[in-house]
Image: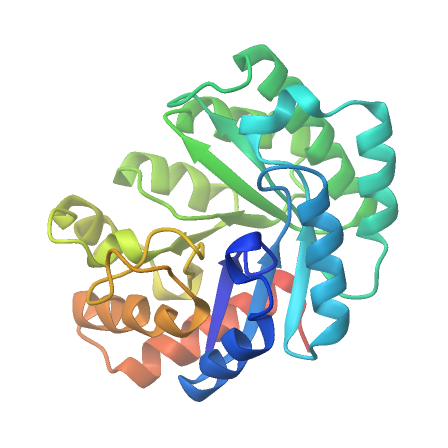
Amino acid sequence: MLTDSHAHIQGKEYAGEAAAVIDRAREAGVETVIAVGGAGDMSSNNEAVALAALFPNVYATVGMHPHDAKHVGDQQMKVLKQLAASPKVVAVGETGLDYYYSHSPHETQREVFVRFIQLARETNLPLVVHERDAAKETAELLLSEGGGGLSGVIHCFTGDYEAARRYLDLGFYLSFAGIVTFKNADALREVARKVPLERMCVETDSPYLTPVPHRGKRNEPAYVRFVAETLARIKNISFEEAASATTANARALFHLP
């Protein structure tokens, strides 16, 4: 059985289809889906929590994407802290640094990221981290602000092995998405080959980053199977071993039953 460790199935792309999407995931062997909040605006957090309350195999996270850090103030943090206490919220995030698009000023991203690190420490929840073109600074903040007590995952990891090693040394998991199946992703596949299986998760980042052979279509949790199959080939192990290990990792990361 598989776990999609990062999906946005509460989004408008799945309006009226959530039950069908979750059914298709189950038919594909996906036993658990983590609905990640914070993409777009605050409403995605409420929607993720509501979806988790409706479906026994769905859990939620609450946070704000670094693109939207400029919209996060005291009131938003207060609401997110309240949501984090919901029974099926299993992590803080997504949060982090994105210097590729820089939709929010870098200093604002850093300040908000630190606030989410603090929230994770206060709630004793793991962090779901989005990082793009900011690996060194992200790791430095996790180390300096985390106090050595943080756990979490770098979602949709696409960095080099130096970045991977830095995160692994912090005790974080690395989650691989559909990008690892793309034809031009040889460098990422080589990094994945070196990352210990016991520190890997798989995800879809639905509705984005649809893996081969469905690239170009809307992504959904059922397709996480193709990510796991690719990792199995990279590591020369069976699909069953890859699925079992990445699901065990997700359970440990998010403290799932």
Residue situated furthest bottom in the rendering = 27
Residue 254, horizontal then vertical, whole percent: 64, 62
Q: Quadrant of the N terminus?
A: bottom left
Residue 252, horizontal then vertical, whole percent: 59, 67
Name the residue located 35 percent from the left edge and 56 percent from the top edge.
Answer: 177
* Figure quadrant of residue 34: bottom right
Name the residue located 36 percent from the left edge and 55 percent from the top edge.
Answer: 176
Up-down relation of residue 189 to residue 235 (above or below): above
Horizontal side of residue 39 vs 131, given as left or right: right
Q: Is residue 132 visible?
A: yes
Name the residue located 17 percent from the left edge and 51 percent from the top edge.
Answer: 190
**In-front residue for pair 99/161:** 99
Residue situated furthest front in the rendering = 16
Q: Quadrant of the C terminus?
A: bottom right
Residue 91, horizontal then vertical, whole percent: 68, 53
Looking at the rendered structure, the number of numbered marks drawn on it comes to 0
* Figure quadrant of residue 203: bottom left
Name the residue located 42 percent from the left edge and 24 percent from the top edge.
Answer: 134
Q: Is residue 1 visible?
A: no
Up-down relation of residue 205 to residue 1 (above or below): above
- The colour style of the image is rainbow
**In-front residue for pair 36/44:** 44
Up-down relation of residue 245 to residue 152 (above or below): below
**In-front residue for pair 245/60:** 60
Up-down relation of residue 231 to residue 237 (above or below): above
Residue 47, horizontal then vertical, whole percent: 71, 55
